[in-house]
Every structure is written in structure tokens, then in C-alpha cells.
Amino acid sequence: MLLIDEIDKSDIDLPNDLLHIFEEGEFEIPELKRDSAPVHQVAPWDDGTPVAIERGLMPCRAFPVVVMTSNGEREFPPAFLRRCLQLRLQRPDRAKLRRIVYARLKPDADLKDRIEDLLTLFCERARTKDLAADQLLNAVYLVMQRVDLLEGTQPLADRERLMEALFKSLDGDQP
């Protein structure tokens, strides 16, 4: 299996390079192709039997399952997309967010009310902002550590600034 995380942030040519590999069943290693030796013995990642690479071309014996993630920040060529099974993940609702928080962080029962308050605030802000579940997890983690970020501050004024920092929109827009 091969994971390509955030392919939309990759080099602009990567999708077409991948198409070539999928269609031809091999890829070129330019450094080995330029070398005068016709065959190179390359050690695999697992220290197993060295692999012979002729003329700088690496043939595929079996194609891996390739999983790619994208934040949708750019378009991909239609020929590339035709070869992909696309899965769009839906944003988790409040109940799912609660399950994520309790499964990941396992907070103490005495923090339930504070966590519910954070869930409410997060869900309200997520209606108008692009937020990620890890932002909620970070806020809950701070609560679990009994960190009082508002100690010695003006609670009403500074609480809003703190929540704005924790639940900052991912789309780059300012409120």
C-alpha cells in the first residue's frame, strides 16, 4: 500500500507521473539511468535480497493499492480522476464528535459539562467556519490537563480571543 497525503500540495506533475507509472508498469530512476553501468543492485527497504535495476527502469511486479488524500485545493486531470475511486468524507455531527473525543482522549466523567460546552461552541462555530476535529481535540486536551488559560485574565473578553485561537477557521478567511 502506498499513501500519498495531501496530493494537492504536491508537485504539479505528480498526478501525470503517477498515470505514467500505472499505465507503463514501471518508472525511471534518473540518477541510475544517467550512470554508465547497465545494471544496479539496489537494497530494498527491508534489507532483503537486492533488486537488479536495468537501464534505470524499475518494473512493477504487482501494483499497490494507492491511497491519496486531498484538501481540494486544486483540480486534477480528468484522465487521472477516471482512474480513482473518490470518497468524500462528511463532516462529523455533534454525536460523532462526542464519540471521537471520548474514544481518543478518554476524559474523566467530572469534565463532562466542560466538554459539552466545548462541543456546543465548536459546533456553533463550525456552521460558519471551516474547522477540523483535531481543533476540538486540542481544546478538550487542555481542559483535561486542568489548564486554566483564563486565570488572571478578564474572562469574558479573553475567553472569546482564546476560543477564536483554538477554533480558527481553516479556510483562511477572517471572521
Image (spheres, rainbow, N blue to C red):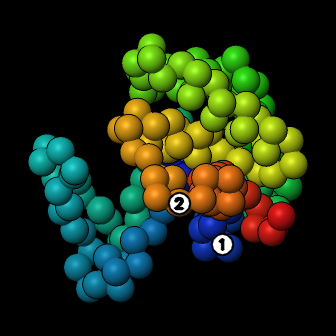
Residue 162, visible in the rendered structure: yes
Query: Residue placed at 41% from the left, 65% from the top?
Result: 57
Task: From the viewer's perspective, tell me whether residue 85 is left or right of residue 141.
Answer: right
User: In this rendering, which labeled residue sits more in front, label 2 or label 1?
Assistant: 2
Amino acid type, residue under disc 1 in the picture: Asp
Secondary structure, mark 1, is loop
Q: Quadrant of residue 109?
A: top left
Residue type indicated by callout 2: Thr
Say whether residue 22 is left or right of residue 74. left
Q: Is residue 156 left or right of residue 40?
A: right
Q: Residue 14 sits in which quadrant?
A: bottom right
Question: Mark 1 — residue?
Answer: 13
Q: Nearer the viewer, residue 35 or 164?
A: 164
Q: Residue at x 77, y 51 (%)?
A: 130
Residue 111 in picture, x, y percent from top left: 48, 23
Crowd class of label 2 (few under 14; some 14 to 19; many from 20; radius 10 Å): few
Q: Is residue 77 left or right of residue 53?
A: right
Q: Which residue is label 2 attached to? A: 153
